[in-house]
Amino acid sequence: MGELLRKECGCCKQEKYLYEFNRSKASHDGIARYCRDCAGQKTRDWAERTKPRNVEKTTWKNDFRNWG
């Protein structure tokens, strides 16, 4: 029964308790693939990589709004 309460993270490969994972309707078991720590880190890494692109979009939108 204890093995049902744990799952291996797809990123850090550590076995963790289910409460350390987010829920996911897309997953076959209803639990996210990555633990919350790894998912958060992946999100922060993605945001840092795409920051220059996001700044360009924001600047363009602000310029367009002020136009006219």
Image: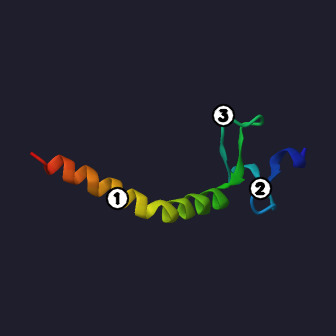
Provide the secondary structure element on which disc 2 rests.
Answer: loop
Looking at marks 1 and 2 on the same chain, the residue that comes earlier in the sequence is marked by: 2
Q: Nearer the viewer, residue 48 or 17?
A: 48
User: Residue 51 sits in which quadrant?
Assistant: bottom left
Q: Nearer the viewer, residue 1 or 67?
A: 67
Q: Does the CB distance between marks 3 and 2 fall below 8 Å?
A: no
**Which residue in the structure is indicated by mark 2?**
9
Seen at 88% across and 49% down, the residue is 2
Could you tell me the amino acid type at mark 2? Cys
- Residue 25 tag number: 3
Does residue 8 sit above or below 28 in this rendering?
below
Provide the secondary structure element on which disc 3 rests.
Answer: loop
| Model colouring | rainbow
Could you tell me the amino acid type at mark 1? Glu
Looking at marks 3 and 1 on the same chain, the residue that comes earlier in the sequence is marked by: 3
Provide the secondary structure element on which disc 1 rests.
Answer: helix
